[in-house]
Every structure is written in structure tokens, then in C-alpha cells.
Image (cartoon, rainbow, N blue to C red):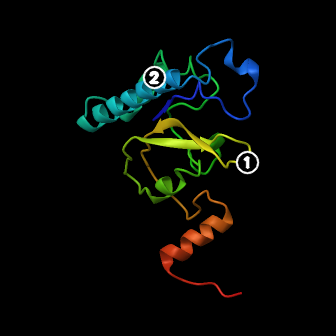
Amino acid sequence: LITNFSRYIKFEQSLPEDDGGSSKFGNPKAIAKDKKYAKDLINQLYNQINSGEITFEQAIQIENNDPVLGKNVYQSLPHSGSFDTTKDLNGTLWASSIRQKINDLKAGETTKPFVVRVANSTDARTTVESYFLVVRMDETSGSYSGMDFKDYLEQSQKRLGYKIYV
């Protein structure tokens, strides 16, 4: 499940025409209002799933159809649905701020809602909170984690406790 709240965030690479004439673009109050709505929605959906009121699939449809942050509002961003973590997904599930959390999930596990930080500059030195995420891991296969080789090697060394001598 994804609830976006970045429509008014001014990213380094934003162009003047990106705001569409909106006085809310870059406005902290407008951003905070969207963030609160996104947080409330994802928490509501998460709680309804856990209580058995709705299925995960129904929660996906509710987010997709939401009039404030659904597909009609955030047309160019990913929305709730099934994802294959072996594919890029435009960084949705592989933002560096969440990579370890996804890698640690086992089949059948679901995360609690959490906020995701994304790069706010072309050099990725600064980040900004952009969306909330709940991930349910239906299945896992293979040993590839989606990380680049260096990160995967470092994680494996820590997890397995070995050293490499070259």
C-alpha cells in the first residue's frame, strides 16, 4: 500500500511550471495537510486489514480510488498494487531508506505503516519524506536482494560473519 503526499514538495530538479500556478507548491502547510491525510488513510487501511474488515486487495482499490491522493491526483507516481521486487519499480520499493526493511521481510509478513524518504537533490545528499508504505511479502525466492553487488556483499558479510581476503 502506498499513500503519496509529495505533490506540493519542491524538489531540487523542479521547474517553475511544475507548480501549475498553485500557491501550495513548496508551502509547508499544504505539504503537512497532505502528509496527515496520507498517514491517516494508510493507518486506517492497515487497521481495517488487521481487523479483517477488508482484504489487502480491497485496501489497494480504496487507495487507488481515493479522491485526495489516488491515481487521478497522483497520476505519474506508483500506487498501491502488487509489486515484484526483482524489477525496478522506479525506486518505489528500493529507495535506500527502506531497502533493509524490505530485505528483512519473510514470506507472509506485513510491515506496519512507515514513511519513506527519497532523494531531494540530483546528488542524493538531501532527502525528503515523500510517501507512506505498507508492504506485505507474499513470497520470496532466490537469494538476490535487489541491492548492488557491494551492498549485498557487505550485508552478507555482516549477516554470515565472514571476511574476504583478496
- Residue holding disc 2: 33
In the image, what residue occupies the spot 46% across and 28% down? 35
Name the residue tied to disc 1: 123
- Looking at the rendered image, the quarter that the C terminus falls into is bottom right
Q: With respect to residue 121, does 151 lie above or below?
A: below
Decide if residue 107 is on the left or right side of residue 153: left
Disc 1 marks a residue whose amino acid type is Asp
* SS at mark 1 in the image: loop
Where is the N terminus found, in terms of image quarters? top left
Residue 166 lies, with reference to residue 114, above or below; the image says: below
Vertical position of residue 95 compared to residue 31: above or below: below
Mark 2 and mark 1: Cα distance apart in space: 28 Å
Give the answer, above or below, for where 11 lies relative to 156: above
Residue 140 visible, this angle: no
Amino acid type, residue under disc 2 in the picture: Lys
x 66%, y 88%: residue: 165
Image quadrant where residue 134 sits: top left
Towards the viewer: 107 or 118 = 118
